[in-house]
Amino acid sequence: MQGFLMTGALMGDVSGSWYEWHNTKEKPKELITDRDHFTDDSVLTYAVADGILRGLEEADRSRLFVDEEMQAQVRSSIARSVRDFTLRYPSAGYGGRFLAWAREGSMEPYGSWGNGAAMRASFCGWLAESLEEAKLFARLSAEITHNHAYGIKGAGAVAACIYLLRTGAGKEEIQKYAGELYDMKFTLDTIRPSYSFDVSCEGSVPQAIEAFLEGEDFSDVIRLAISIGGDSDTIAAIAGSLAEAYEPAPEDLRERALAKLDDFLRETAVRISEPLTPPVYWT
């Protein structure tokens, strides 16, 4: 692999795609098989990245914090890219309200608190030059549809954790940070028997973070995320995006995930990764 390529969410998404509708309470032995495929998690992750980069082409990034007009410009750019990518892949597995939003062409959000805001936010943490910028990008990416406080919080949590991890934070720091946002007083073993499908940020982001915290390595993080059942592709996508910022992913897993993409999405993954700074473990 030449240069850093942002594929953590993709690897988690593809790994969990089959299990979303075939929940398991065990760690899968093999990740990314012939039955697996990319879903809306991957499509929208790369759509948000595309939209942010296009929006920043015409913005003064140094003034983005204080210029609400400029924020609106970037937000609109994200919305356009998200809509364009969605209509390009209309059968990727979106929620009904989201798909209606994309098809209707409205620029108005609809107050969602769903985990869609969090699953697509990883690029915000990779591109950011500060923790506050990570949360700002995440807020703008969420607000196009998921402008409920829980949706914004979920996106911000993912982006912030990725920023902290890629710049050198350890798991203890992430546990503390996440604990300020969510009740993290649980383990996957304690919730696994009763955990069920939950598409809310409040009911899936903490679980994804916990999978990252408990994982022994990148692949184990993905396996743990899948092992609790529920919205498996999204939980694994979020957990994988965090793990990628902390430790190297197996190269064969990355290549198998990339092979699931068509040329457009694969080229998008390469293009949006070009301006990103590799994580500290590369040095």
Image: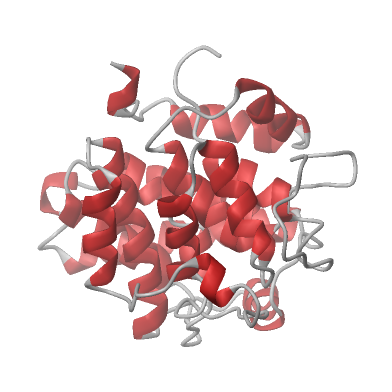
Give me the residue at 53% from left, 30% from top: 249
With respect to residue 251, does 11 lie above or below?
A: below
Color encoding of the figure: secondary structure
Image position, residue 82 (x, y; %) = 56, 59
In screen coordinates, is 218 left or right of 68?
right
Give the residue drawn at x 66%, y 69%.
231
Farthest residue, direction right:
35
- Residue 134 seen in render: yes
Instruction: Please tell me which residue lies in front, 42 or 32.
Output: 32
Locate residue 110, reporting x and y percent: 50, 86
Residue 85 position, x and y percent, is 65, 54
Position in image of residue 158 (x %, y %): 38, 58
Asked if residue 115 can be seen in this view, the reply is: no
The one nearer the camera, 165 or 23, is: 23
Q: Residue at x 71, y 54 (%)?
A: 16
Q: Quadrant of the N terminus?
A: top right
- Residue 277: quarter of image: top left
